[in-house]
Image: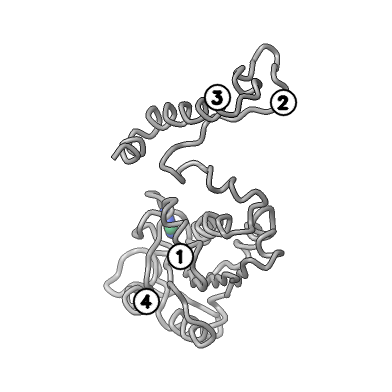
C-alpha cells in the first residue's frame, strides 16, 4: 500500500530539499510514498494571487483567507478520501513517537502549512480534522514543521529503511533514549571504546546497552523514565 501525502503551501519550493535527499527521496523513488506539494496561490482568484488579508477587528499581522484554502481542499477531496486533514500549528498536539507510528500506517494525508498570523478560524473549524505541532516554539511557517512530521512518519513505512529493525531500536520506541554508539578506531588518541563492545559477547553487549539506555533516560529525560516504569 503506497502512502499518499498532499501538502498545501504558499512556499512550495521550501519543501523541495527535504524530499530530494536521503531516506525521504529513497522512499519516494521506491514508490512507498508519494508526496505532492500544492501551491495555494494556484487557487487564488485575484490577479496578484493573494492568499492573505487583514484581520477583522484589527491588529498586526495578516490572515490566510478561507476562499483559496477551501477551494484547494475541496478540489483535492474530489480525488481522494483523506484519513486526516492536518494543520501544522503550534496550537496542535505535539508530535511524539507514538503519533508518528500511528500516522505511518495511514493511507492518505493532507497537510496545510500556515503562515502569517495563521488561517481564518473557519478553515480550522470546517476543514481541518487534526492540528499538529512539532514543539512549543513558533516557526515562520508550517513548511519546516510539515517536513519534520513527514520525515518522522515516512521512515517508519515498512521497506523504507534498509534494515527494518533500525526503526524499532530508535530512541523513544520503547520510551527509552538510545545507548551510546561507537565505530572505528577502537582507540582514538587514548579515547577508548568500552571493552564490552569489542568482546563479541552478544548477551553482555545487550545488557550493557539496556543499562546505558536506562541510565541516560533517567538522567536526561526523567519524564520518559517514569512513563516506562508504570
Ligand atoms: N507553525 C509554526 N510553528 C509551528 C510549530 N511549532 N509546529 C507546527 N507548525 C508550526
Task: State which image quarter holds ligand 1.
Answer: bottom left
Classify mark 2 as within 8 Å of ligand 1 or not, answering yes or no: no
The first of marks 1 and 2 along the sequence is 1
Position in image of residue 68 (x %, y %): 47, 82
Q: Secondary structure at mark 3?
A: helix
Determine crowd level at label 4: few under 14, some 14-19, many 20+ residues with C-alpha closer than 10 A: some
Mark 4 → mark 2, Cα distance in angstroms: 53 Å
Q: Secondary structure at mark 1?
A: loop
Expressed as whole percent of the image width and height from the top left, the position of residue 52 reads 44, 74
Q: Which of the two discs, 4 and 3, labels the residue nearer the N terminus?
A: 4
Q: Which mark is residue 143?
A: none
Query: Which residue matches tag 4?
Result: 123
- Tag 4 and tag 1, C-beta contact below 8 Å: no
Residue appearing at x 45%, y 79% in the figure: 69
Mark 2 or mark 3, whichever is nearer to me: 3
**Which residue matches tag 3?**
204
Spatial CA span between label 4 and label 3: 55 Å
* Along the viewing direction, whichever of 98 and 94 lies nearer the viewer: 98
Question: Which is in the foreground here, disc 4 or disc 3?
Answer: 3
Q: Judge by depth and name the residue closer to the eye, 92 or 64.
A: 92
10 Å crowding of disc 3: few (<14), some (14-19), many (20+): few
Q: Position of residue 34 (x, y in %)?
A: 62, 70
Q: Earlier in the sequence, mark 4 or mark 2?
A: 4
Residue 184's disc is: 2
Q: Would the CB of label 1 be found within 8 Å of ligand 1?
A: no
Q: CA distance from mark 1 to mark 3?
A: 51 Å
Identify the disc placed on residue 115: 1
Amino acid at each position: 500500500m503506497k502512502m499518499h501525502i498532499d501538502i498545501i503551501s504558499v512556499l512550495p519550493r521550501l519543501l523541495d530539499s527535504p524530499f530530494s535527499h536521503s531516506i525521504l527521496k529513497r522512499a519516494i523513488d521506491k514508490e512507498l510514498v508519494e508526496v505532492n506539494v500544492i501551491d495555494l496561490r494556484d487557487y487564488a482568484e485575484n490577479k496578484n494571487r493573494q492568499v492573505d488579508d487583514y484581520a477583522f477587528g484589527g491588529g498586526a499581522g495578516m490572515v490566510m483567507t478561507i476562499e483559496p484554502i477551501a477551494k484547494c481542499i475541496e478540489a483535492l477531496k474530489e480525488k481522494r478520501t483523506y484519513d486526516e486533514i492536518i494543520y501544522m500549528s503550534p496550537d496542535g498536539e505535539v508530535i511524539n513517537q507514538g503519533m508518528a507510528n500511528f500516522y505511518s500506517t495511514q493511507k492518505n494525508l493532507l497537510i496545510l502549512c500556515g503562515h502569517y498570523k495563521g488561517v481564518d478560524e473557519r478553515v480550522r473549524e470546517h476543514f481541518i480534522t487534526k492540528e499538529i505541532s512539532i514543539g512549543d516554539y513558533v516557526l515562520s511557517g508550517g513548511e519546516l514543521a510539515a517536513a519534520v512530521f513527514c520525515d518522522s512518519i515516512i521512515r517508519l513505512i515498512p521497506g523504507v529503511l534498509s534494515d527494518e529493525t533500525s526503526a524499532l531500536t530508535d530512541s523513544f520506541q520503547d520510551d527509552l533514549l538510545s545507548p551510546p554508539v561507537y565505530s572505528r578506531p577502537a582507540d582514538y588518541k587514548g579515547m577508548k571504546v568500552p571493552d564490552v563492545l569489542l568482546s563479541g559477547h552478544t548477551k553482555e553487549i545487550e545488557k550493557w546497552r539496556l543499562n546505558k539506555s536506562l541510565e541516560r533516560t533517567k538522567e536526561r529525560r526523567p519524564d520518559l523514565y517514569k512513563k516506562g516504569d508504570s
